[in-house]
Amino acid sequence: MSTEKVHDHPPHFFELKSGDYWPTGLARSPWDRQSIAGGPISAILAHGGMNSELDNDFNIARLTVDIFGKVPFAPLHMRVDVLRDGRQTKLHRVTLFAANKPVAQAHLLRVRKYETPVVAPEMPYPLPNEAGGHQNTTSFGMLGAFQIKFIEGAAGVPGRAVAWTSMEADIVLHHPVTAFERAAMFSDYGNGFGNATDAREWSFANLDITMQFLRMPVGKWMLIDAETHMAGDGHGTARNIFADEQGIFARGFQTIFVAPGYLSEGIPASFTSDGVIKR
C-alpha cells in the first residue's frame, strides 16, 4: 500500500486568513529559515496588484519590486494605493507589512489598451519540448514545485544561464496561479541563474526587481535568459530576458548587493571592523 499523502489542492505559498497572508513552508527562504524568499514576495505583490475589471481595459506595462530587508516568515498584511488614475495610464503601489512595519512594495504601471503596430523581437530560443533534460529543484527547498530545463549554463555555476522553468503551485490557496504571478515569481531567479561568481565565495542578494512587459505572458512554461555583471565596487546588475512559448514577453533588471560568501577566504578590509566581519 502506498503511503504517499494525497492533497485535495495544489501546493501554495500563502493562505489568506483574517485579512493576512500566512506563508507556508514553500515560501520559506532556503538561505534563512526565518525569512521568506524573494520569489514568493514578488509573486504575492503581483497577486495583490491584479485587478480583473481594470485589466480589461489596461495592460500591465511595468512591475517594480523593492525589498526593504529580510522579510520575516510571519503573517503579512497588504495595502494597495492608487498613485495615478489617468485615462491613459494608471499607477498602483502594493505594500506588504509585517507587524505594521513595511517590508516590501511593488509599483504596477498600467497603459490603456489600443490597437498599435506589432514590432516583436526575434525568438532565438528552442521551445520547452525541444530543450534538454529536465531537472527538479528540490535542492532549492521548493518541495518539487518547480521544474527547470537548462539550455545554457546551470544554477550555481558562474556565467550566463538560459532555462525554461515551470511552477506547479498556487501563490494563494484557492486562487489558481496566473501567468503574471508566475512571471513575478521567476523575476527573482535571474541573479541566481546567471550569477557572476561562486556563491560560496561571494554572495549576490537582489535588492530590487524590474520587469518591463511587451505583453502579458501565457502558458505554464517560461524562459529566463540571465546574466550578472559587477564592477568591483560592492554591487552589480542582473540582466534578464523572459519568454513564453509565443516569444519574448518582458525584459528585466535586478540590483545586486555583493558581499563575501560563507566560504570566502579573502575578506576585504571594508567588511571588517576590529577583526569582526560585517555581514
Image (cartoon, rainbow, N blue to C red):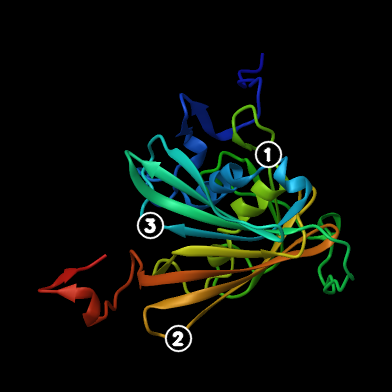
Q: Position of residue 17 (x, y in %)?
A: 48, 25
Query: Is the N terminus in the top left, top right, bottom left or bottom right quadrant?
Result: top right
Q: Which residue ends up furthest to the top in the rendered image? A: 1
- Between marks 3 and 2 in the image, the one whose residue lies nearer the viewer: 3
How far apart marks 2 and 1 lie (CA) works out to 38 Å
Residue identified by numbered label 3: 68
Q: Which of marks 1 and 3 is in front?
A: 3
Q: Classify the position of the C terminus by image quarter.
A: bottom left
Q: Where is residue 251 in the image (x, y as percent from the top left)?
A: 68, 68
Against 97, is 4 above or below?
above
In the image, what residue occupies the spot 74% across and 53% down? 58
**Of callouts 2 and 1, which one flags the residue occurring earlier in the amino acid sequence?**
1
The location of residue 123, given as percent across then percent down, is 84, 70
Residue 177 tag number: 1
Hey, which residue is sitting farthest front in the picture?
87
Q: What residue type is labelled 3?
A: Phe
**Residue 150 found in image quarter:** bottom right
Q: Describe residue 208's horizontal placement relative to residue 146 as left or right.
A: left
Relative to 212, is 69 above or below? Answer: above
Please name whichever residue, 183 or 131, is drawn nearer the observer in this view of the structure: 183
Amino acid type indicated by mark 1: Val
Q: In this view, does 58 lie to the left or right of 11?
A: right
Q: In this view, does 202 lie above or below 163?
A: below
In the depicted structure, whether residue 135 falls above or below residue 196: above
Residue 169 percent across, percent down from the top left: 64, 37
Indicate the quadrant where residue 72 lies.
top left
What residue is shown with label 2?
231
